[in-house]
Image (cartoon, rainbow, N blue to C red):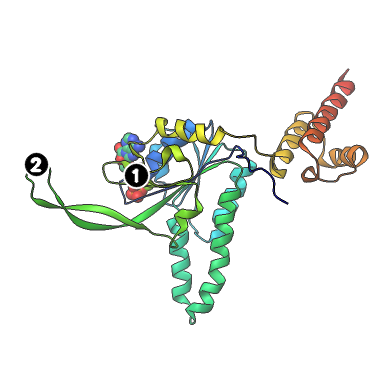
């Protein structure tokens, strides 16, 4: 029943919280570019990520409807397009949508009962995405009195408090942190021991390197059904073979009808067969 626990190589699930201007978008893009080669941004902030298009190379999908299913649709499309990193900037709009839906309802208890499963489905879709995922969340801001280092007198300073999101959502992520208005990131929760309670000024390459070191320290994670499907599709498209022809080979050779039912080794063999058939035809 029990077996020795092993750490598998994983993909990043990172929540970046902070008030407006703290650096959520910029830092997410800066970290993303050091995590992988391609980045997809799901932008809910009226094209705010695209203001950084001259500094960072990424593709963007701008959401104007914040229903969780719209986020999930964009996540699915980004997964199918095999981006290395998906940035959701920001998730707070899904929360605003939930608040709006429930405030309109006659019976808010029943309304929350309908909305909560959608919220859960969106969280599950983020956690299951076949890419590193960085999610930004706005935080409520408050003014507090802080002793000025120059005069020693208390001066008002704007700080971020709780994320504008369902309470406790940051615990769904492997690593969560809060940015302040000096672009100083404080890691508040981390499953990566190396990053626990650390701070990072202008987070970027150095933080991404430490995250990658932690993620790659383990045995390779088993290939997902989506990844197998993507490999097979790329192989058949390269040789102009239809999905039906590939299905016939799968059924004849492996008695299976979908890539999800193949092991990674069988997937390798199927791809080798597709390539061999093509070379035999063109010879
Ligand atoms: N990691 C960083 N390294 C260097 N500069 C940064 C970093 N993060 C933020 N900045 C600076 O702070 C500015 C504001 O950052 P950004 O637009 O990311 O804020 P934001 O938190 O996304 O704000 P909003 O909630 O209004 O969208 C950037 O234009 C950049 O000049
Ligand atoms: Mg932003």
Residue on which the image places disc 2? 150
**Residue at (27%, 45%) from the top-left corner?**
181
SS at badge 2? loop
Q: Position of residue 133 (x, y in %)?
A: 52, 44
Can you give x and y, in whole percent of width and height, for residue 19 in the image? 32, 51
Q: Going by the image, does 278 lie left or right of 55?
A: right
- Give the residue drawn at x 23%, y 53%: 158
Circle number at residue 90: none
190 or 141: nearer the viewer: 190
Q: Residue furthest top?
A: 283
- Mark 1 Cα-neighbour bin, 10 Å: few <14, some 14–19, many ≥20: many
Q: Nearer the viewer, residue 166 or 56?
A: 166
Mark 2 crowd level (few <14, some 14–19, many ≥20, 10 Å Cα) = few
Horizontal placement of 234 versus 46: left or right? right
Residue at the image position 44 percent from the left and 59 percent from the top: 168
Image position, residue 243 (x, y; %): 81, 41
Q: Are the two marked residues, 2 and 1, in contact with CB atoms closer than 8 angstroms?
A: no
Q: Secondary structure at mark 1?
A: strand
Tell whether circle 2 marks a residue whose Cβ is less than 8 angstroms from ligand 1.
no
Quadrant of image for the C terminus: top right
| Ligand 1 location (quadrant) | top left
- Looking at the image, residue 115 sits to the left or right of residue 99; the answer is right
Q: Judge whether 203 appears above or below 154 on screen.
A: above
Of residue 44 and residue 37, the one placed in the foreground of this image is: 37
Q: CA distance from mark 2 to mark 1?
A: 24 Å
Question: Hey, which quadrant is residue 25 in on the image?
Answer: top left
- Identified at 56% across, 33% down, the residue is 217
> On screen, 125 above or below 85?
below
- Residue 161 in percent (x, y) is at 31, 57
Q: Earlier in the sequence, mark 2 or mark 1?
A: 2
Nearest the camera: 239 or 125?
Answer: 125
Residue at which label 1 appears: 186
């Amino acid at each position: 029943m029990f077996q020795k626990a092993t750490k598998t190589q994983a993909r990043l699930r990172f929540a970046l919280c902070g008030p407006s201007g703290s650096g959520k978008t910029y830092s997410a893009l800066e970290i993303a570019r050091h995590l992988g080669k391609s980045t997809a941004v799901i932008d809910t902030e009226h094209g705010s990520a695209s203001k950084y298009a001259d500094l960072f190379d990424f593709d963007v999908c701008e959401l104007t409807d914040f229903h969780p299913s719209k986020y999930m649709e964009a996540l699915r499309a980004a997964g199918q397009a095999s981006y290395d990193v998906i940035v959701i900037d920001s998730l707070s709009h899904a929360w605003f949508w939930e608040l709006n839906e429930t405030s309109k309802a006659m019976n808010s208890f029943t309304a929350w009962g309908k909305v909560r499963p959608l919220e859960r489905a969106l969280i599950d879709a983020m956690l299951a995405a076949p890419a590193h995922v960085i999610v930004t969340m706005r935080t409520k801001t408050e003014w507090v009195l802080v002793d000025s280092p120059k005069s020693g007198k208390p001066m008002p300073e704007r700080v971020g408090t709780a994320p504008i999101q369902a309470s406790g959502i940051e615990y769904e992520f492997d690593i969560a942190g809060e940015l302040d208005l000096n672009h100083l990131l404080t890691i508040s929760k981390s499953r990566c021991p190396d990053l626990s309670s650390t701070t990072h000024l202008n987070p970027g390459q150095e933080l991404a390197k430490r995250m990658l070191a932690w993620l790659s320290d383990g045995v390779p994670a088993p290939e997902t059904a989506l990844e197998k499907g993507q490999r097979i599709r790329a192989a058949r498209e390269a040789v102009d073979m239809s999905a039906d022809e590939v299905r016939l080979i799968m059924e004849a050779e492996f008695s299976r009808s979908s890539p999800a039912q193949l092991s990674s080794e069988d997937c390798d063999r199927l791809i080798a067969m597709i390539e061999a058939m093509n070379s035999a035809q063109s010879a």
